[in-house]
Image (cartoon, rainbow, N blue to C red):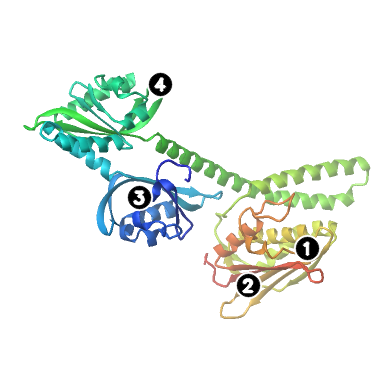
Amino acid sequence: MLSCAFPSLVFWGKELVQLYNDAFIPLLAERHPSGLGQTAQECWWDAWQIVGPNFQRVMNDGETVFHENTVVPIVRDGRLQDIRWTYSYSPIFGKDGDVLGVLVVCQDITREMSAARELGESAARMRENAQRLGELAAIVESSDDVILSKDLNGTITSWNNAATRVFGYAPEEMIGASILKLIPEHLHSDEKTILENIRAGRRIEHFETIRLTKDGRLIDVSLTVSPIKDEEGRVIGASKILRDVSRRKRMEQSLLQAEKIAATGRMAATIAHEVNNPLEAIMNLLYLLREKIQDDEGRSFLATAEEELGRVSHIAKQTLGYYREHAAASRASVSDIAENALTIYEPRCTAAGIAIRRSIDPSVEIVLRRGEIMQAISNLIVNSIYAMSTGGTLSLSVSDASSAKDGVVLTVADDGAGIAPKDLPKVFDAFFTTRATVGTGIGLFIAKQFVEGHGGQISIESNTETDRHGTTVRVFLPLHTAYE
């Protein structure tokens, strides 16, 4: 955004906090510098009725919103003015597909549109209004958009600075030349259609097509062509405003590609989730199989199998992102799910020198997605195992809660190294991890998503002090979950 030559803004987060580049400062007028850091609604209160729904479409639906030559009344220089804008509101996607903010690229085209309109109306009065024509010519020359005129034979009669910048031709190369010089050969028939409409007095607005530059590049453009009439109302030529929209087209393609990548990521995450659970079961079975194999060659094969399965499991965990179970919710006991999870991970705990302390009371059955709660508990257990690299005690308890918010409380605790205070606020963020070599940083993130998806709450406490180090995670699931 900062390096963009066009006026650009970023509105970040749910509050839509506003940032903008230097090119946008002139358009802010008296709103600068106070507009930096304001929310969108605070800064653009006078236009919120128009622009607010655009933000809503982008943030809620992930849509790209584009409007061209749109009137948005705003207060400027102390009075309400009708300002014409061309703007694009684009979503800024996070790695999990969520919309994190809005990128806005815009232009105030009030002056250019006014100049073009006045140029068309004044062409027949050139001799009587030379001074006015000079003023308009200065505006045309300073326009960021290509503005040119041609006669009814398609011969170019005027050529502004922006046309030189976009197409690479100097005025002396183009004035008197055919407009077909700028049109790819396979689109020459389009010019015939345009001239027929102009002769009939019809205006052509926002016609998107392709044009050819001096160096042979094809660029995407948007055209507005208006008839020029003489004093008697006869059409004598046409004025053309052309905008290079190649950047917008590339942006749209990039967004489309990003959406495809996001869809691929979601599919990969789902597959990884389905693969990861049976991998965990196989790993635990291999732990149990160790004691059954006596010969050295068999143990060597078993060690190789464990190593390869561990590598596959790590790849699956790296791939696994935000996953939502699609099976229907049903009544289940959190105690039963917790016991099942401990049964799976007990062999690994034994091998790692970790003692398991259970305090699992029968819990009331609640409506939940069993796979999601199983995954959440498994993630908490795995985190505790990794935290106790030299052994320790893993404590897991389940009990019914009796309070104004009846439900079930599950607690997973360990006496591992603990989490540093500076890292504790970030542990539920996606892809944040304190493990340097192993870990994807999504275990607690996924657990939080699943618990809160049921209408529950998850909290964490940790200490790194020598005499009382360790971590405790508490999960509360209400008696009446979101799936009931």
Q: Are marks 2 and 4 in contact (CB under 8 Å)?
A: no
Q: Are marks 1 and 2 in contact (CB under 8 Å)?
A: no
- Compute the Cα span from label 1 to label 4: 64 Å
Q: Which residue is mark 3?
A: 27
Q: Which mark is residue 408?
A: 2
- Circle 3 residues within 10 Å: few <14, some 14–19, many ≥20: some
Q: Which mark is residue 18?
A: none
Q: Which residue is mark 4?
A: 216
Between 112 and 153, the one lying in front of the other is 112
Residue extending farthest to the bottom is 403
Circle 2 or circle 4, nearest the eye:
4
Q: Which mark is residue 417?
A: 1
Residue 371 visible, this angle: no
- Circle 1 residues within 10 Å: few <14, some 14–19, many ≥20: many
Which residue sits at x=57%, y=44%? 265
Q: Amino acid at mark 1?
A: Ala
Question: Please, what secondary structure does the residue beneath circle 4 have?
Answer: loop
- Compute the Cα span from label 1 to label 3: 54 Å
Q: Are marks 1 and 4 in contact (CB under 8 Å)?
A: no
Q: Are marks 1 and 3 in contact (CB under 8 Å)?
A: no
What x and y, as percent, mark residue 394? 78, 66
- Compute the Cα span from label 1 to label 2: 28 Å
Image quadrant in which you'd find residue 424: bottom right
Q: Are marks 2 and 3 in contact (CB under 8 Å)?
A: no
